[in-house]
Structures are given as C-alpha cells and as structure tokens.
Amino acid sequence: MNGTELTPGRWHTSHKPVVRYKSFLYQAVSWKTARRVVAKVEFHFGELFPRVGFIAITLAADNRAVVRFYNKRGTAEQWIKEGKQAVAMTRLSCHRFRANEVRLWLSLIAYNLGNLWRRLVLPARVATWSLTSLQQRLVKTGGRLIKHARYYWLLLAESQLTRGSSEACCGGSRRCRRQRDRWSVRQSRLP
C-alpha cells in the first residue's frame, strides 16, 4: 500500500468524505497467531489529517461489511447504555426472579414510551436529545401550576425549557391527541 492509494486526487471537488478500506495481517506480541485488521481511512474536506480506524477481527467478510457490522454493534451498545442510565434497566436488586422480571419489563416499557415520545411528539431540535437529557430538562423540571377562571399558567423553575420549546412540545402532543380523537371517531362509526 503506497501513499497514492489513500490520498484524494486533484479532481475531487465534492465535499463528501473520501473513504478507503484496506485489510492486512497483524500479530501483536501477546497473540499466538496473526489476525486480520481492517483499516478505514476517511479524508474530510477542509481537514488536514485523515480519520483512521482499525478493527482486529476474525470475521471473514468484505472490509466495508466488517466496518458496517461494528458500527451497528456500537449503535446497539449506545442504546443499551441509554437504557441503563435513563430508566435503570439493570437495577434488579430484588431477591426473587419474578420481581426482577417485572422490574425489567417496567423499565423496558418506560424506555419504549420515552422513545415514542421523543420520536412522535417532540420537535426536531429536541428529538435528538438523550432520554436522560429529556428527563432532566423536561420531565424533572420543577414548576407551579396556577389556575385562573378560564386558563392555566405553568410557571417553571428551570431556565432550560424555554417558552418556544415548551409550546413545540405541547403542539406535538396536540397533534397526537387530534389523531387519537380522529381514530376514536372512526372506531365509533364502525358497525
């Protein structure tokens, strides 16, 4: 592998990163046999140095497929980590198996409801937040509800939730409520 294989040419005018994959055998001192290593090199427009990643594997697949497989694995591990932090999925401290099973089911239901809320109701700029951030900024925000004759005032103690973002969140829930009402009207018309 010489340097010309990895460098983008002068004809490259797109701002998309140039990605190259290469595999080779490598044996560390502590390893008994040599293993296949897949290298991914990305050249991004405007960056001086390329981004390089290495994966030591025993999987017999195409270089691009190996990198895609490990990226998906990392994404799944991030979801597991989010579930552990946001809803304490792994806090199974009961002595009985059935109680731990129920607690795990409740954690999974809470995790799925949080994801549905994030994807269906919340505005786009808030939908990228983690479930832990949503809990801290939206759910666990202290406030006071004041009732007047014809309306309610919600006074929030935290400054993280602005008026615009709270209206956007409520607007999303109104959309869901309207769809639910339409569905209930359709169901009531069925014979």
Image (spheres, helix red, strand yellow):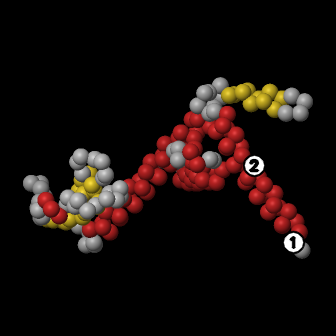
Tell us which disc is closer to us: 2 or 1: 2
Q: Residue furthest left?
A: 29
Res. 190 mark: 1
- Residue at x-position 53% and y-position 41%: 132
Q: Quadrant of residue 58?
A: bottom left
> In the picture, which quadrant includes the N terminus?
bottom left
Question: Residue 108, position in %: x, y?
Answer: 57, 53
Question: Residue 103, position in %: x, y?
Answer: 58, 49
One can see residue 37 in this view: no
Residue nearer the viewer, 11 or 162:
11
> In the picture, which quadrant includes the C terminus?
bottom right
Res. 174 mark: 2
Left or right: 95, with 169 as reference point: left
Q: Quadrant of residue 156?
A: top right
Q: Quadrant of residue 167?
A: top right
Residue nearer the viewer, 163 or 144:
163
Q: Amino acid at mark 1?
A: Leu
The secondary element bearing badge 2 is classed as: helix
Judge whether 6 appears above or below 121 on screen. Answer: below
Distance CA(mark 2)–CA(mark 1): 24 Å
- Residue at x-position 26% and y-position 68%: 63
